[in-house]
């Protein structure tokens, strides 16, 4: 199967509104990332996953740098496939390739997945999901237009009520999402898209580009930011509710001419933010701990020592001894 990770991306805010004492609990949790790219003609893949309880935000990253060619001086492909996911929802998925003038085939992919299984102790707990999609891009540039390229980017939200043990919702259970594709086979670029919007909340705006610029033919399809709300009804004690979101990017280049491509799903916020990217009524997500006053004092003391050392070094350099 070409897509090893289930696909979909979003910034989540799950709320159990109108019940001040609703208690949502995380029964199961997992984040995972994938990066795949060629290295000297051999495809290398890196996968990482974590299913420990939510804690202080951290970044789970998988990256493979692409180098393909007979030697470092004759590389036909330079690029990378990288994905980053955190326990509180920050994400990034990107594949980038610069394809040289020697005939070669380049294929790269990256993806992320965030999964939670929830339950409640309060009758009639509303399950309302507020999310923000942050943007995507698939762009290819080929000299003289002679190339065969295949780019796609996927974003889906999937849910399941009372899933069987160990089952993680995938695109079969998708309730919102899209797939954008850019294709070319020694001809002008073609663009295609498919989307799913079961509750009619809308899909992020799409734009396309197909033009010649300085001997290069450029094709691009992008999606802008989007915010939406999905209502999944009421959750009762004893019931469970699973949410999955994931992103996937993929590129394939087969060309004897210089070609470059980038496919990405981007979160514009910092991956190092300490605040969680989603919140739930009745479930408090931990943030980074606030340093103790003694920690600040130690930090200040260390800075003073560093400044003093730099001052002595500059003084010595300006007035060296004989």
Image (cartoon, helix red, strand yellow):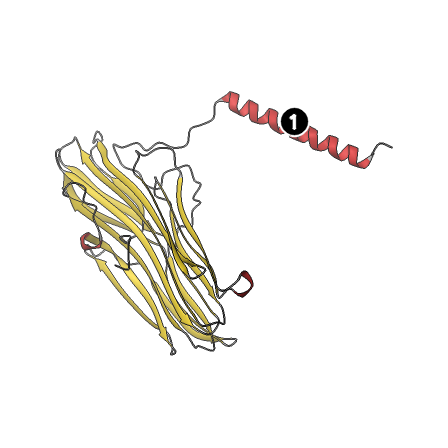
- Left or right, 291 with respect to 228, comes to right
- Left or right, 59 with respect to 299, comes to left
- In the rendered view, would you say 43 is above or below 103? above
Hey, which quadrant is residue 199 in on the image? bottom left
Nearest the viewer among 4 and 132 is 4
Q: Is residue 264 visible?
A: no
Nearest the viewer among 221 and 50 is 50
Q: How far across and down, in percent of the image, does residue 119 sit?
A: 18, 35
- In the rendered view, would you say 39 is above or below 85? below
Hey, which quadrant is residue 153 in on the image? bottom left
- Name the image quarter holding the N terminus: bottom left
Q: Is residue 246 visible?
A: yes
- Left or right, 77 with respect to 194, comes to right
User: Helix, strand, or loop for circle 1?
Assistant: helix
Q: How far across and down, in percent of the image, does residue 121 sit?
A: 16, 30
Hey, which quadrant is residue 122 in on the image? top left
Q: Which residue is mark 1?
A: 305
Nearest the viewer among 124 and 119 is 119
Q: How far across and down, in percent of the image, does residue 109 sit?
A: 36, 57
Label 1 CA crowd tier, 10 Å (few <14, some 14–19, many 20+): few
- Left or right, 119 with respect to 144, comes to left
What residue is rendered at 47% in x and 78% in y?
144
- In the rendered view, would you say 133 is above or below 183? above
- Name the image quarter holding the C terminus: top right
In this view, the residue farthest toward the right is 322
Q: How far across and down, in percent of the image, does residue 127 sit?
A: 20, 41
In this view, the residue farthest toward the front is 70
What residue is rendered at 19% in x and 42% in y?
166
What residue is rendered at 65% in x and 27% in y?
305
Nearest the viewer among 162 and 317 is 317
What residue is rendered at 26% in x and 38% in y?
29
């Amino acid at each position: 199967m070409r897509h090893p990770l289930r696909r979909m991306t979003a910034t989540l805010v799950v709320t159990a509104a109108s019940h001040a004492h609703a208690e949502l609990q995380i029964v199961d949790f997992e984040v995972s990332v994938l990066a795949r790219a060629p290295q000297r003609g051999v495809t290398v893949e890196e996968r990482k996953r974590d299913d420990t309880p939510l804690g202080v935000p951290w970044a789970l990253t998988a990256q493979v740098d692409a180098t393909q060619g007979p030697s470092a001086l004759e590389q036909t492909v330079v690029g990378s496939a990288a994905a980053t996911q955190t326990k509180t929802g920050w994400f990034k998925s990107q594949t980038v390739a610069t394809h040289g003038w020697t005939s070669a085939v380049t294929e790269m992919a990256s993806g992320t997945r965030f999964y939670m299984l929830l339950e409640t102790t309060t009758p009639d707990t509303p399950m309302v999901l507020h999310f923000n999609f942050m943007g995507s891009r698939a762009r290819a540039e080929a000299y003289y237009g002679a190339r065969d390229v295949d780019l796609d980017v996927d974003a889906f939200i999937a849910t399941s009520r009372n899933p069987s043990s160990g089952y993680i919702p995938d695109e079969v259970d998708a309730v919102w999402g899209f797939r954008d594709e850019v294709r070319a086979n020694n001809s002008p670029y073609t663009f295609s898209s498919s989307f799913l919007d079961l509750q009619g909340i809308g899909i992020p705006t799409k734009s396309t580009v197909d033009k010649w610029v300085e001997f290069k033919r450029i094709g691009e399809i992008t999606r802008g930011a989007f915010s939406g709300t999905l209502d999944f009804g009421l959750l009762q004690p004893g019931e469970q509710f699973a949410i999955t979101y994931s992103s996937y990017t993929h590129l394939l280049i087969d060309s004897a001419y210089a070609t470059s491509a980038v496919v990405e799903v981007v979160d514009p916020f910092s991956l190092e933010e300490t605040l969680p990217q989603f919140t739930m009524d009745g479930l408090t997500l931990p943030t980074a701990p606030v340093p103790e006053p003694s920690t600040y004092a130690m930090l200040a003391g260390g800075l003073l020592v560093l400044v003093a050392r730099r001052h002595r070094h500059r003084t010595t350099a300006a007035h060296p001894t004989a």
